[in-house]
Image (cartoon, helix red, strand yellow):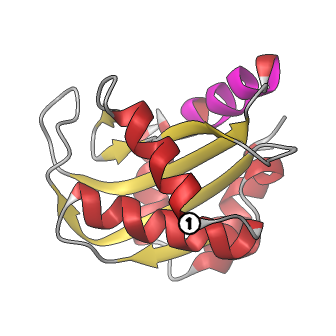
Amino acid sequence: MTPSDIIRQHSIVRLSGASKAAVFQALARQAAEQLALPESVILTALNRREALGSTGVGKGVAMPHAPVPGLTQPFGLLARLDRAIAYQAIDDEPVDLVCLVLTPENGGKGRIDALACLARLLRSQAVCERIRSAAGSEDIRALLLEEN
């Protein structure tokens, strides 16, 4: 599994939101449109997972993830936020890159593979800086293809 298998061209977005809740709402809306699933189902799954502990992994990056009923394969969405938000990340730093990972309810190893693939990508500070400074989604997509 590679980053470009999970995050496709139309799944690279720019979002604004003043809070984690607003960003989750925007992520759920974007994912629902692309997956033809109810926004409320996605938002509920995200909030349920986040209640277990913050998905803010540090260095300005968050990886909210959840199993979602009705999905047949992992889905990723990479969002650059217009401005960093408080996220209760492990390093207490604000977050400006959010990588949403949704997986089938009985995702098993596929869930772990999808999360591990994207976590490996985003743990590189150099990759994160390239994403932050990219001109648009095409440049970010090219970066994801490089990382295959």
Q: Nearer the viewer, residue 57 or 123?
A: 57
Q: Name the residue located 63 percent from the left edge and 65 percent from the top edge.
A: 38
- Mark 1: amino acid: Glu
Q: Compared to 128, does 27 lie above or below?
A: below
Q: Quadrant of residue 17?
A: bottom left
Residue 134 as seen in the image, left or right of residue 34: left
Specify few, some or many for label 1: CA neighbours under 10 Å numbering under 14, 14-19, or 20 or more. Answer: some
* Magenta-drawn segment: 109-119
| Residue 115 part of the magenta segment | yes
| Residue 52 part of the magenta segment | no
Residue 92 as seen in the image, left or right of residue 24: left
- Residue 54 percent location from the top left of the image: 29, 31
Q: Name the residue located 42 percent from the left edge and 71 percent from the top edge.
A: 26
Q: Quadrant of residue 15?
A: bottom left
- Residue 83 percent location from the top left of the image: 22, 71
Q: Which residue is mark 1?
A: 39
